[in-house]
């Protein structure tokens, strides 16, 4: 028998009784309890992650402090060399600035060639890249080993 499309679906499909109402309340409490349990587990896991992060930060901070202490001791034992490193770093910084100026001018002059093919870009990187990388490394070492000049330092 075909069903009449004009026929409306029944409005009440579930019979409510006192026992089924209690079951419905218990069945809705169960998912809430599961969600609360999951959230408690997530909080416990997050607390553990926070503890681990604090340990990592503590370890990194200790090694950084030790390195800074060693550098400071070296500077105190070698004050003249530390000042020399500072002067060399300042001069090399000026040379680096000039080198970067030349690099940017060459990039501006050959801008179209850089976009059109790899040859010009490879040539530029081969020409400036290694020298710039080494210069940056030397400057970093000199800067770490140098002392910052102040009014109380004496000449050795």
Image (tube, helix red, strand yellow):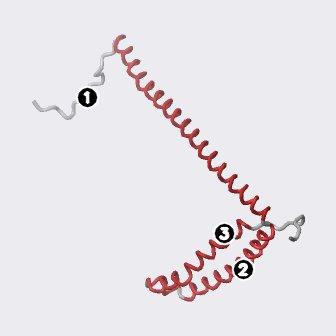
Check the picture and name the quadrant holding the C terminus.
Answer: bottom right
Classify 23 as above or below 107. Answer: above
Q: Residues within 10 Å of mark 3 (few under 14, many from 20)?
A: few
**Residue at the image point whose x is 69% and y is 52% from the top:** 66
- Location of residue 150 with respect to 58 vertically, above or below: below
Label 3 belongs to which residue? 140
Q: CA distance from mark 1 to mark 3?
A: 79 Å
Callout in the foreground (2, 1): 2
Tag 1: Cα neighbours inside 10 Å, few (<14), some, or many (≥20)? few
Dot 2 lies on which element?
helix
Left or right, 126 with reference to 141: left
Q: Which residue is mark 2?
A: 94
Q: Nearer the viewer, residue 24 or 79?
A: 79
In this view, the residue farthest toward the top is: 18
Whether residue 14 is situated above or below residue 53 in the rendered picture: above
Judge the density around disc 2: few (<14), some (14-19), many (≥20) Cα neighbours within 10 Å.
few
Question: Which mark sits nearer the N-terminus, 2 or 1?
Answer: 1
**Residue 95 picture quarter:** bottom right
Earlier-in-chain disc, 1 versus 3: 1
What residue lies at 56% left-to-right and 35% top-to-bottom?
Answer: 47
Q: Residue at x 72, y 80 (%)?
A: 94
Q: Would residue 151 be found to the left or right of residue 65 on screen? A: right
In the image, what residue occupies the spot 68% across and 83% down? 98
Q: Position of residue 81 (x, y in %)?
A: 77, 70
Q: Quadrant of residue 83?
A: bottom right
- Return the x and y of residue 4 as percentages of the image width and height: 17, 32
Report the residue that reaches farthest toward the front: 77
Q: Are marks 2 and 1 in contact (CB under 8 Å)?
A: no
Q: Secondary structure at mark 3?
A: helix
Left or right, residue 95 beside residue 10: right
Residue 150 numbered mark, or none: none
Residue 125 locus on image (x, y percent): 52, 81
């Amino acid at each position: 028998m075909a069903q009449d499309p004009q026929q409306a679906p029944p409005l009440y499909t579930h019979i409510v009784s006192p026992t089924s109402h209690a079951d419905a309340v218990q069945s809705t409490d169960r998912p809430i309890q599961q969600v609360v349990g999951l959230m408690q587990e997530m909080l416990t896991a997050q607390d553990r992650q926070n503890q681990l992060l604090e340990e990592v930060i503590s370890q990194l901070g200790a090694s950084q402090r030790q390195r800074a202490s060693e550098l400071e001791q070296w500077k105190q034992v070698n004050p003249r060399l530390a000042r020399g490193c500072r002067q060399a770093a300042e001069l090399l910084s000026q040379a680096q600035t000039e080198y970067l100026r030349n690099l940017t001018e060459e990039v501006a002059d050959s801008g179209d060639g850089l976009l059109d093919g790899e040859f010009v870009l490879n040539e530029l990187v081969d020409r400036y890249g290694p020298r710039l990388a080494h210069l940056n490394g030397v400057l970093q070492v000199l800067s770490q080993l140098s002392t910052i000049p102040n009014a109380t330092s004496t000449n050795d």
